[in-house]
Amino acid sequence: MPWAVEKWAYFVILEVVRAQYFATNCWIFATGKNSECFIVDPGMAIPDLVGEIAEVITRHNLKPIATIVTHGHLDHTFSVQAFDEKYGVATYIHPKDREFLGNPWGLLSARGPIAPLLKEMGVTTFAEPTDVRELLDGTSIEIAGFTLKARHAPGHTPGSTVFVVNDEYLISGDVLFQNSIGNTTSLLGSSESMRKTLRNVILPLNDELIVLPGHGPETTIGRERKNNDYLQDRFLRSSD
């Protein structure tokens, strides 16, 4: 069942569906009932996450027009193609992670948890959705009544991107969590790039921004600036 965020600011509908595997947050944004919407990072479920997302869409009588992808890891992209097949929406992603929509193996370690899971599920092939639109750093787009500003935030993956929404929310993907950050030890991860991202992209953001992470509960920039060990100088100025 979807878990609804108890936050109705300016009549905005903001809900999240947590994926069956890895508890990835799929955020759903709409300006209100009977309006357009966009989704973020539809993750892994059997056979996919579309049914659970569709329940939220139907309940509010929404019209999906876009999928936002924060990065190319399969626990965030597994249901992108299935969602596109049902709704025919545009999919937005940074160009450095685009290739992993159709070839997620490029980010998967054979010793990681996802590869054996795919084998167990019998999933062997992936393909890009029909309408992929690349977003570069600093690009602003208008979707479903919201203004999204993309900020390239590499470290977890080369194309990881965070999105400031209406100067009120930060879609942080696997860059920033409550009291933590995304790992940099997976394929193509970079701890040096992550530190630069935290210093140059995350720390300058307004304290009041509500952080909507790829996993776990929401938080704020101010709370993380104060409590998150990874946003302190002793980590940011360290080296591997």
Image: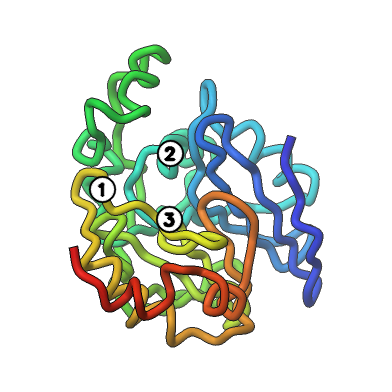
Q: Position of residue 100 (x, y in %)?
A: 26, 43
Residue occupied by mark 1: 185
Percent position of residue 90, x then y: 43, 54
Which residue is farthest front? 234
Q: Earlier in the sequence, mark 2 or mark 3?
A: 2
Please say if the residues under marks 2 and 3 sit with CB atoms less than 8 Å apart: no
Q: How many marks?
A: 3
Rendered residue at 48%/60% (across/down): 180
> Which of the two marks, 1 or 2, is nearer to us in this view?
1
Residue that numbered label 3 is attached to: 174
Looking at the image, can residue 145 be seen?
no
Kindly report the distance in space between the C-alpha atoms of the residues bearing marks 1 and 2: 16 Å
At label 1, the amino acid type is Thr
- Look at 36% across and 28% down and name the residue there: 114
Which image quarter is the C terminus in?
bottom left
Judge whether 65 appears above or below 22 on screen.
below
Q: Is residue 193 left or right of residue 210?
A: left
- Mark 2 residue type: Asp
Image quarter of residue 70: bottom left
What kind of residue is marked 3?
Asp
The quadrant in which the N terminus is found is: top right
Residue holding disc 2: 75
